[in-house]
Image: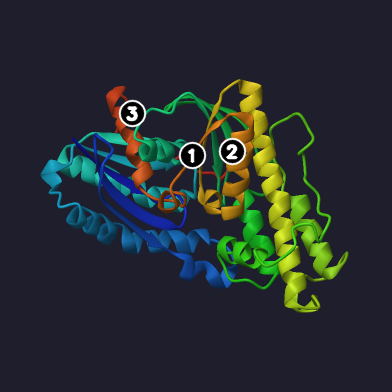
């Protein structure tokens, strides 16, 4: 059995063909980073228009790469929630059209659950129940995952997402968009304790996150209260690296601390992590060490599957096995925060 999966929740146009043993036969991801770089963030209208231009070529390339004919596709899965409305609609309309044209079942996929399912694909075995942690540019969510399709929210960001904070701080430091990787590289040359930055909500019992205050603290460190953050005001490259390292360490403290707390509170000894920030080396190192000390079994999505991709849409097989197919009047559920 072969599943065609489509992902257009934000600014990556992606498709994949996966078989029911979760073997990836073909996968294509078209990034839009160059389109949004001038704005230091994703512009929804630009993202939607780019999806329109790229969706059919991406699907065609995926079928060719997987050496799959339309007649060999058994079902079509598409991410419908959460995300940017225009972006989601492009993927959904493409999936509906192909489902109708090829007379195949349509399956809706929750983007956040799919990020956790990437860990299950990589592991090659069942990982549920577990604590699931999605850390990306648009999401910072902790879940109790009793099955691939049964998630309960434990905590989430109340303002900026973790990846969003990385991008905004990177911009303040004069780094290119997307800022996560450039900031991490700069941080490798800095001192993690050079600046005393806040760890918002870390000592509170609730499992929510907040990064706006941390971001503001970096702004003040550069410009002072009421000033405009301009990296040229920092005295040298070493100071810039110290600020990057101090910010990254503060954010990682929050991410690791809350995820370990979620495992303790639920009594679950398995943690599965996905999303773009899961590619951050310092975060992975700290998480591995903490989980080892706590006796927690850790699974982090492979680097290629941390950022948005369609392979994780293989979650659709779980819906198919459960008899959960979608009607052709299916609609999207937009929004960057899902509680």
| Element under disc 1 | helix
Question: In this figure, which residue is indicated by the disc labeled 1?
Answer: 112
Depth check: give the residue in front, 298 or 56.
Answer: 298
Give me the C-alpha separation between circle 2 and circle 3. 21 Å
Asked if marks 2 and 1 touch (Cβ < 8 Å), the reply is: yes
The x and y percentages for residue 215 are 74, 56
Q: Earlier in the sequence, mark 2 or mark 1?
A: 1
The x and y percentages for residue 10 are 47, 53
Residue 111, image quadrant: top left
Give me the C-alpha separation between circle 2 and circle 1. 8 Å
Is residue 329 shown to the viewer in this render? no
Question: In this figure, which residue is indicated by the disc labeled 2?
Answer: 141
Mark 1 crowd level (few <14, some 14–19, many ≥20, 10 Å Cα): many
Q: Earlier in the sequence, mark 2 or mark 3?
A: 2
Question: In this figure, which residue is indicated by the disc labeled 3?
Answer: 318
Residue at 61%, 41% in the rendered image: 289
């Amino acid at each position: 059995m072969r599943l065609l999966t489509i992902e257009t929740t934000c600014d990556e146009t992606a498709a994949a063909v996966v078989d029911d043993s979760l073997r990836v036969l073909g996968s294509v991801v078209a990034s839009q980073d160059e389109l949004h770089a001038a704005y230091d963030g994703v512009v929804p209208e630009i993202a939607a228009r780019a999806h329109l231009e790229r969706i059919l070529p991406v699907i065609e390339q995926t079928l060719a790469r997987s050496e799959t004919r339309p007649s060999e596709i058994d079902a079509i899965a598409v991410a419908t929630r959460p995300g940017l409305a225009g972006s989601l609609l492009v993927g959904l309309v493409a999936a509906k059209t192909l489902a109708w044209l090829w007379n195949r079942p349509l399956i809706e996929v929750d983007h956040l659950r799919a990020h956790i399912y990437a860990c299950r694909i990589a592991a090659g075995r069942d990982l549920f129940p577990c604590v699931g942690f999605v850390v990306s540019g648009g999401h910072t969510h902790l879940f109790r995952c009793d099955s691939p399709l049964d998630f309960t929210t434990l905590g989430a960001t109340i303002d900026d997402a973790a990846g969003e904070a990385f991008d905004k701080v990177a911009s303040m430091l004069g780094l290119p968009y997307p800022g996560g990787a450039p900031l991490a590289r700069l941080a490798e040359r800095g001192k993690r304790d050079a600046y005393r930055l806040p760890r918002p909500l870390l000592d509170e019992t609730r499992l929510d996150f907040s990064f706006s205050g941390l971001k503001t603290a970096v702004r003040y460190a550069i410009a002072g209260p009421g000033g405009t953050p301009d990296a040229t005001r920092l005295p040298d490259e070493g100071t810039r690296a110290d600020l990057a390292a101090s910010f990254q360490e503060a954010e990682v403290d929050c991410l690791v601390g809350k995820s370990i707390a979620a495992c303790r509170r639920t009594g679950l000894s398995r943690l599965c992590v996905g999303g773009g920030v899961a590619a951050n080396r310092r975060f992975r190192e700290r998480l591995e060490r903490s989980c080892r000390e706590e006796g927690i079994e850790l699974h982090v999505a492979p680097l290629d599957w941390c950022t948005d991709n369609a392979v994780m849409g293989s979650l659709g097989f779980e819906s198919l096995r459960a008899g959960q197919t979608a009607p052709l009047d299916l609609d999207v559920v937009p929004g960057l925060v899902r509680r």
